[in-house]
Image (tube, grey):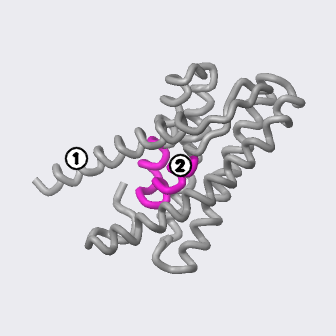
Amino acid sequence: MVDSLREVRRLVRLSLLTALVAVATRVVQIPMPATEGYVNVGDAVIIAGSLLAGAATGGIAGGVGSTLADLLGGYSHWAPFTLLIKGLEGLLMGALARGLGVDLRRRSGVLLAVAIALLGVTWMVIGYFLVEWHLYSLPPALASLAGNVAQGAVSVLCGVPLAVALSRRFAASGRASSQSVD
């Protein structure tokens, strides 16, 4: 019974995080005409979710949630690339956070979380740059680079504090203060 309840909680957490990524991606969108894409804040949710819930949850929620936003927003041509780029972004951050034992209640853990988030969004920027270069050529890819970097920076500035606040809230309510099991 306990294992069933744990699995239900994990599935609910994954579903909610996936939906939150999709909503955050759809709510704030700044179009990038050069590449027919857009800048969004969905990465902030991917960062927070990956730091708190680990690699599998961060990867699935990041990839599927962002892809759903593309499909619902008329950017279906980006969906396969988004699934790969955002999925790997969440997977990378979650795996590093879990592997390095990030404790968001400690200053050193928060600094490590910032470094992990910067690495994750760096992958996102490089991934989209390479796809844009392949699809559109170098000038449009370069034109969208600043937007992707800004998206990554804003997402780190929002995502890490969100993860810290949620971690502290979970600790205050008696739940696990560190990341839950994937």
**In magenta stretch: residue 128:** no
Circle 1: residue type:
Val
Residue ID at (65%, 65%): 115
Quarter assignment of residue 37: top right
Element at badge 2?
A: helix
The amino acid sitting under disc 2 is Gly
Q: Residues within 10 Å of mark 2 (few under 14, many from 20)?
A: many
Please determine whether, in this image, residue 9 is positioned above or below residue 137: below
Residue 57: x, y in percent? Answer: 42, 48
Location of mark 2 (residue): 90
Residue nearest the viewer, comparing 101 with 68: 68
Name the residue rendered at 46%, 53% in the picture.
49
Q: Residues within 10 Å of mark 1 (few under 14, many from 20)?
A: few
Residue found at x 17% / y 52%: 5
Q: Quadrant of the C terminus?
A: bottom left
Please report the bounds of the magenta region as a residue range.
Answer: 43-61
Disc 1 target residue: 8
The front one of 51 and 153 is 153
For marks 2 and 1, the one nearer the N-term is 1
Compared with residue 178, is residue 119 higher up or lower down, i.e. above or below? above
